[in-house]
Image (tube, rainbow, N blue to C red):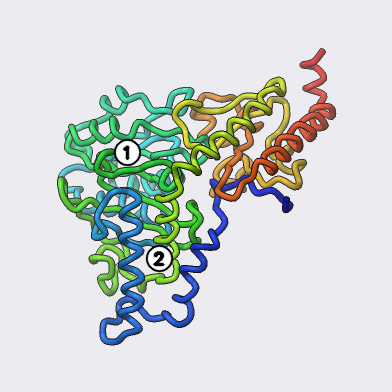
Amino acid sequence: MEFPVYLDNNATTPLDPRVLEAMLPYFTSKFGNAASRSHVFGWVAEEGVDYAREQVAKLIGCTDKEIIFTSGATEADNLGIKGVYEMYQGKGNHIVTVATEHKAVLDTCIHLEKLGARVTYLNVKEDGLIDLAELEAAMTAETILVTVMYGNNEIGVIQPIREISAIAHQYGALFMTDATQAVGKIPVDVDADGIDLLALSAHKLYGPKGVGALYVRRKNPRVKLTAQMDGGGHERGMRSGTLNVPGIVGLGKACELCRLEMDEEAKRLSALRDKLEQALLLIEESQVNGSTSQRLPHVSNMSFKYVAGEGLMMAMKDVAVSSGSACTSASLEPSYVLKHLGLSDDIAHSAIRFGLGRFTTAEEVDYAIESAKKELKQLRNLSPLWEMVKE
């Protein structure tokens, strides 16, 4: 076993060696610009991009022409939300989203509010799921977009996507989902799920950083977007810029591997996660945050009362875990996702997120369990508050 043990796969995943192998030629011998149509170097690069587009499309059940390559899910979220708002503001200016979304969605909505958008931020229940009745009550004739994350990045909760999209469509709105944590981990089918736009990122599914994609539905309904980057008309005019060919090839290969191995991987990871939770729940004053029935197979968010999560993370020197989203990990505030579940500041501050992955072993999980038990005991022994509770 190598140290430190990596259990922060929600923040990023290691590159699968098979993905690296597929990418390498596109840094050297196949270095052409995919937009160069006048010689073989460009044609070879374009072939690599076209094949990757098919690989991504197969994973989520769409056609290759519906995949727009971006620099990652944050750009895909921005392009989807801002692109819809600008294109459809003649119909209405109302967007519905959820208070526990990733900052890539929340900050984009805040930006649009300054430009005249009206945004409804739905609350979640104690388990992290939205109330469908509240969603329906929020819908109006002015609603142009409903955007709800597929699987939450901090607590792993999976929203009822099919029911949500049905409500959006009933009111003539488009439905978008940030599926960054879900794609490649659980089956996602854009047609069956009623998804019109979907954002994903390569580095969350064992591909390279700096590349992602936005799925944009072509029919029933045909979704139109206003481009957010101009110059050259790449990606069907929706996202200009020279394509990151090695990254795109890596994303394609990563998607293909997930499609072939996802079911077995999910079974193995959910068994390891359950083992981790069952062992740590034996520690008094511990709890799992969010739904334990509707969630991703590789994520566990746990709170250990009377211990600061940051302190526990630092004490577990040989185990890489986090207290929430990588995008907000520098903040001293408790996780806004956990606060929206109704948890107190103390319990939210005592949370640790375990993110298991393709390369996580049973031995590593055993080590993490023992490390957490040992460090928790020591930290609580030093805590006057814990002493008072015990007395």
Q: Say whether residue 74 is visible.
A: no
Number of the front mark, 1 or 2: 2
Could you tell me which residue is drawn at 32 percent across and 74 percent down? Answer: 46
- Determine whether 241 is above or below 96 in the image: below
Q: Nearer the viewer, residue 318 or 234?
A: 318
Q: Is residue 372 left or right of residue 258?
A: right
For numbered disc 2, what is the local secondary structure?
A: helix
In percent of width and height, residue 138 lies at: 28, 29
Could you tell me which residue is drawn at 77 percent across and 16 percent down? Answer: 389
Q: Nearer the viewer, residue 322 or 369?
A: 369
Farthest residue to the top: give it.
391
- Determine whether 184 is above or below 161 in the image: below
Residue named by callout 1: 119
Q: Nearer the viewer, residue 35 or 122?
A: 35
Three-letter amino acid code of the residue under disc 1: Val
Residue named by callout 2: 248
Q: Say whether residue 228 is visible.
A: yes
Give the class, few, some or many, for how many residues have Cα within 10 Å of label 2's Cα (few <14, many ≥20). Answer: many
Q: Is residue 381 left or right of residue 344?
A: right
In percent of width and height, residue 162 lies at: 29, 33
Farthest residue to the bottom: give it.
39
Could you tell me which residue is drawn at 35 percent across and 43 percent down? Answer: 188
For numbered disc 1, what is the local secondary structure?
A: strand
- Determine whether 267 is above or below 90 in the image: above
In percent of width and height, residue 169 lies at: 20, 36
In percent of width and height, residue 77 lies at: 37, 51
Q: Earlier in the sequence, mark 1 or mark 2?
A: 1
